[in-house]
Amino acid sequence: IIRKKNNSEFSPLQLFEVGGGNGTNAQFILDYIKENSQEVYEKTSYTLIEISPAMSDRQRQLVDPVHPSKCRFVCHDFLEWHEVFEEPCFVIAMEVLDNLPHDKLVRKMGPFSTSVENENWCEYTKENKASWFQTMIQQKGKSKEYEEVLKPLCDKLAMRAASYYLTKLNANDSLNKTDTGIAFRDFIRRPLDVMEQMSRNSVYRERKLAERPDPKSNLRKVFVPTGAVQFMDVLHSKFPRHHLIAADFDELPAPDLTLNQLLQTKDKPGSLLGCRNAPLVSGNTQDYPSYLHKPGTADIFFQTDFQAMRNAYIKIYKSNFVSSE
C-alpha cells in the first residue's frame, strides 16, 4: 500500500475495510504505516465498514485509542452502500467473500441429454436458460422445518451470477481441474512442497466426491456467488477508482462426516451431497450435511474461485464503464 502510495496519485491515502472483524487488521496496517512512513500516516484516512453493531463497537474500542482521529467507523451493509467516493482508494476485504450470500441453482437435464451435455452441464447459456431453476426456501407448513421449492430461473441477480461464473471457460478450468499426481523426482527435490500439494490433492478429491451428482437423478445443483456480484457492483459503481485487496479461502475440505451420514440426507431439503461449490456448514463441535439450520447455530463458508471472480470482475467493470459513458 505504501509503495503504491509513493508511486501514484494517492494523496491522501484513503483505505476502506469491509467486515474488519475486531479491528486487528486495521490496527496493524495503521501501525505499519506509522512506523515506516510518518509522512504517509499523517495523510492516511481509514474507514471500517461493518454490518454488525457489536463488531463495529469492538473495532472502535480497539483502534481509536491507538490511532485517534484516523478511523471512521460506519455500521452499514456494504452490499447496500450508496455513498459515491470518486477519489483513488484501497478497498480491503479479508475473509469477507466466503460469508457473502450464494444462490442455489438447479438444472434439469432432459431424458435424451447427450453425454457431452451431461459432462458440461454446469454451463449457463441463453439457449439452455429454460432448463435452469432457482431454489426458494420456505417454512414447511406450521412446523419449524424448511423446504426447498424450485421455480424457473428469473431472478436477475442470480442470472447475472450464472452468466459470469457458469461459463465454459470457468467450467473447463477451475471447476473441472484434475489431480495430475506427483513425479518422484519432484518429491526428492522439494519434499515439503510436494507433501503440501499431495495434501491439497487429497482434500480436493474428497470434495469432488461429495459434489459428484447422483447418476440416477436428472437434477444438477450448483451454488453461485450472488453476493460477490453485488460486492463487485458496489466497488465499480461507488468506488470507481478503487484498488481491491482481497484474501479468502480458495479451497475448503469436504464436511467432516461419514459417507453414511451424507447419504442419509441425500433426498432431504438442504442436502449438500451432489451439489457443486457446496458450502462447509460448521457448528461449534461438528459439521452438518445440510445448510437448512436455524440462523445463528452454524457458520456457512464458501470457497472463492479467484480466477472466475477475476473474469466476473472484468465483465462488471466493462458494463459499468460502458453505462457511464
Image: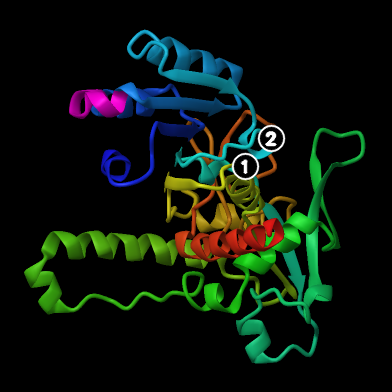
User: Does the CB distance between marks 2 and 1 fall below 8 Å?
Assistant: yes
The residue that mark 2 highlights is 82
38 in magenta: yes
Residue 193, which numbered label?
none
Point out the stretch of residues depicted in magenta.
34-41
- Name the kind of residue labelled 2 in the image: His
Depth check, front residue: 9 or 79: 9
| Image height of 3 relative to 175, above or below | above
Q: Position of residue 124 (x, y in %)?
A: 70, 73
The residue that mark 1 highlights is 238
**Can you tell which quarter of the image residue 143 is in?**
top right
Q: Position of residue 111 (x, y in %)?
A: 80, 85
Depth check, front residue: 319 or 286: 319
Does residue 305 appear anywhere in the picture? yes
Residue at horizontal 53 percent and vertical 49 percent from the top? 302
Q: Residues within 10 Å of mark 1 (few under 14, many from 20)?
A: some
For mark 1, give the secondary structure: helix
- Between discs 2 and 1, the one toward the N terminus: 2
